[in-house]
Structures are given as structure tokens and as C-alpha cells.
Image (cartoon, rainbow, N blue to C red):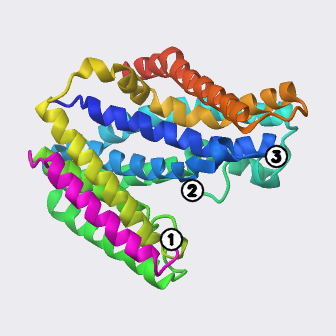
Amino acid sequence: MKKRLDLIQVFRGLASMLVVLYHLVSTGEKYFSTKPFNGFFEFGWVGVDFFFVLSGFIIMFIHYGDIVNKGNWRLFLKKRAIRVYPIYWIVATITFAMYMILMHGNMRDEFIFNIHSIDHWIYLVKQYLLVYQETYFVSVAWSLTYEILFYLIFALCIFVGLRIAKYIVAIWIVMIALKSITHAPIFSSFVFAPGNYEFLLGCLVGYLFYKKQFISITKALISFSLILILFVIYLNYFDLTSNMLIAKLFFGSLSALIIWACASIDYQKVYNAAKIKLLVIIGDASYSLYLIHPIVLSTLCRVFAKIKFQTAFSSAINNMLFLIIFILTVLAGFLFHFFVEKKVLAYFSKK
């Protein structure tokens, strides 16, 4: 089965751009005292939910055979580490340097880095290793800590093999549910966070696709609609933020259906790949865009805010300005991918 899924890459690119637009809303409001695009893209955080499901799908689809055959778990972790860490370290170093030089160490959440504090250096080391903590100066790093957790658990499943791996996953599922329902402090809010279900939903779809169980567009749309209807009914009685378990299951299920449908279409190749080439390229650059967009957005908004001065622009002109900032940010992500990420990955892949 072919492992290059172009349509999946398209949605990966769309998800990364949604996250950019989500952060543009808050960053733009901070510097311009007005919400870009009237706050329409405040829902863009769902792009992260899609990434979690997609990660589970890709890892299961590519490495399910490793679990069955007790493959090389060390090689799996090495490949994942090469994919995540080197690029992240570059972005983290640039971000840290900018905070120290331009902001005099004043980082996120009023945290001021003190070079003489051992605790602050421990905080920095954890940040670079993507160890879970409460705050991050690279704002998207929190999501990468969950990625690393998922990779570690998947590596454990490879090590123990399929028979025992089933029990590990079952225990994880139950513990996440118990933590979400009871809120017991004895359970880790990180290891048993509801968002981890999204990786497992991705794994489920990855397993089905590995077994060549495809879904038609019609069935996907019907399932998508039913889940959406049930969720709307739920929202009439409950606040979304009151139950993150339900929210993550909802967004995770919708993302899983989209991925399953796209992968099924990809396998059948019933579209002209040349027509979506640009979106595929953005999808390829999604990790770079995801990492650097916060600092690029902040820099561009700061620069444009100074140029604008106190001129009262109309809403249309403001949104045109925000559109330019968005396009420049996506372009920066692509350039970083092409000139940095690809070269770094090529270098470490030879090791």
C-alpha cells in the first residue's frame, strides 16, 4: 500500500493554517485592539485536535507491523526524536534569544528568566526536552509534550508486542476516563488527559486503513453529520468547557472521520494530484509553520502596529492588513521548512 497520502497532507496544511489564524486573532487584538476577521477564527484551535488524531493515524499505519513483530523500539524513538527535536531546538533557541535580548528575559505569563536561578535553568532544560510543565516560552510546545508521551507509550507497545500492548492501551483508556470523571488528584492530569484519546482515535483509523478497511464519502458524511447533531444537542444542555472528555471525543471523532475518508480517497486516487500541489506543499511545511508562527506573528504585528501608528483604519483595511500578516507568516513557515527543516532532517537521517 502506498504511504504517500497527498490528501492527508492537504488537511495537515489546512489544520496548521487554522492554528495560525487562531493565534492571529489573539495576537492581533493585543497589538491593534481589534480582533482580526471579527474573531471568526477563534475556533482555529481545533487544528491541534486534528494534529493529535493525524499523528496517531500515521504512527499506527506505518508502525503497526512493528508492534506485531516486536520491532526495533529504539529505532522508532530515534526516528521520532529526529523528526521532532532538532527543528524544535532551533526555534526554541531563536525564541529564547529574542526574549532575553528584546524583552530582557520577560517571558510568557510575567515570567522573568534569571540566569542566576537554578530553578530557571531546570525550567529551560525541561523546555528543550519537552518535559511537561505549566508554562512554555515556545507557546506551542505544550502540544509537543503530548506527542512525546504518545511516542513513548507506542514504543512500549512495540517492545512488549501486540498481546500485552492491548492491555496497556485498555488500561490507558480506562484511566483517562476515570481521571476525567472523578478528577482524582492521584491521577496525572498529563498522562491521563482527555486529549490523549485523540491519538487513540487516530490509531484506530490507522489500524483500519492498514487492514484496507476503507470508508466511502457518503458513509463518512452521514457519520460526520450524526456526530455533529449529537454534539449540538449536547451543547443545548451543557457547556463545552465543562466536560473536556466529551469535547475531545467529539473533535477527535470528526477529525478521525475526515482522515479516514481522505486516506480512502487517497488510496483510490480518484482526484488530480497536480491541482492540490500547493496545499500539499503547505502540508509538508506544517511542522515548521506550527513551530515558528507564534514568534513570526508577534514580530509582524509589532512592526505593523508601529507603522500604523494611531491611524483609525476601517475594518476592511484592518482585515486586509491581517491577511497580509497571515500570508507572510505562512510564507515564513514554508521558507523555514525548505531552507532549514529539510536540510536538518537530511543531515540527521544520515547519522
**Numbered disc in front, either 1 or 2:** 1
Q: Quick check: can you spot residue 86?
A: no
Magenta region: which residues? 212-239
Label 1 and label 2: CA atoms lie apart by 25 Å
Rendered residue at 15%/54% (across/down) = 219
What is the secondary structure assignment of the residue under circle 2?
loop
Instruction: Classify residue 3 by image quadrant.
Output: top left
> Residue 54, relative to residue 285: is it above or below?
below
> In the displayed structure, would residue 93 be above or below residue 340?
below
Q: What amino acid is found at the position of numbered circle 1 in the picture?
A: Leu
Image quarter of the C terminus? top left
* Label disc, if present, on residue 113 of the rendered structure: 3
- Residue lying at 77% horizontally and 54% vertically, measured from the top left: 109
Disc 2: which residue: 132
| Among the 4 quarters of the image, the one containing residue 333 | top right
The 10 Å Cα crowd at callout 3, few under 14, some 14 to 19, many 20 or more, is many
Q: Closer to us: mark 1 or mark 3?
A: 1
Q: Which residue is mark 1?
A: 240
- Residue 59 vs residue 351, the one in the foreground: 59
